[in-house]
Amino acid sequence: MGTEANASSPQTPAPCPAAIPVSQNIPLTVGTPSGRIAYVEAGSGPVTLFVHGVLVNKHLWRHQLNALSDIRRCIAVDLLAHGDTEITPEQDVSVTTNADMLAEVLDALRVDQVDLVGNDSGGGICQIFAARHPDRIRTLTLTNCDAHDNWPPEAFKPFVDMVNAGGLPNTLNAMLADKAVFRSPEALGGCYENPETATDGDIDTYLQPFVRNDQRTRDLQRFVAAFDNKHTRAIESGLRQLRQPTLIVWGTGDIYFPVKWAHWLADTIPGAKAPVELEGARLFFVEERSQAFSQLLRDHLLTAS
């Protein structure tokens, strides 16, 4: 922004449902040492792995899965403490642990390499994964996201303070009860150029998992409380050795991640091209400008193939 699974007993994944359109949103799960990780997938071929950020889930990438399933096996996961992923109450949910979880998912699905795509804190997690597992990256795509010492970003700190003060349950319930609260500038409205882009159904899909039980709310609290830029500062040297083709697409209207961070990433990652700037776009442009972003991503994947 679960507690029932046995986090220590990986199981054989379900067969790849390549013929199932992602619009049906059929959830799959795979057992890993970090928990039972939920995901959706569409298509076949080389794998592209999509990683969302805080307060959303795999649903964020629905447009890309539909748009790119003709050229890739597209997989969108739910992070620890998000969506339909099930973890134990004591499970570490830090961003580095989430990056390691991605490697566990790939192991369980018997996938060697991926095209990795991230947004928001998911983009930071992708950087950590790429620095720790460079041999598993075919290409990297980063959209507006945490980087280096900008985690959490200044504009997000009031939310972090609210969570740490115990206000998360009431905030989640308020956003679910009145979707205008979710769309307000004080909540997630600032992530969109037009907050009405988020339908009532989208909001329910993002937030309902956090209130299924008290433990899920506490898991999200722990995820937010664990934000610390030590994780991304620690992998800078790894990023400076990353030569895999890297696409950086950045919305210039984002209140959390100024465009200077796109250029920092481009200057830091040797394989990165000059950033593509989307004038006025905000954090969740992968939803709002899905067609434009999907075309940029398609061109990147096909060029790098």
Image: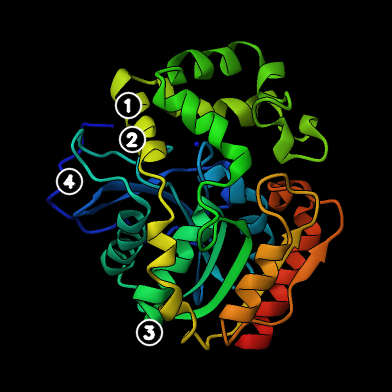
The answer to the question of whether label 2 and label 1 lie on touching residues, with beta carbons closer than 8 A, is yes
Quick check: 37 above or below 235? Answer: above
Query: Label 2: few (<14), some or many (≥20) within 10 Å?
Result: many
Q: Is residue 124 left or right of residue 93?
A: right
Q: Tag 2 or tag 3, which sits nearer the N-term? A: 3
* Three-letter residue code for mark 2: Arg
Secondary structure, mark 4, is: loop
What's the mark number on residue 218?
1
Q: CA distance from mark 4 to mark 2?
A: 18 Å
Which residue is identified by label 2? 222
The answer to which of 231 and 95 lies nearer the viewer is 231
Q: Earlier in the sequence, mark 4 or mark 1?
A: 4
Left or right: where 291 falls relative to 174 = right
Q: Quadrant of the C terminus?
A: bottom right
The residue wearing badge 3 is 135
Q: Is residue 29 visible?
A: yes
Q: Are marks 3 and 2 in contact (CB under 8 Å)?
A: no
Who comes first in sequence, dot 4 or dot 3? 4
At label 4, the amino acid type is: Ala
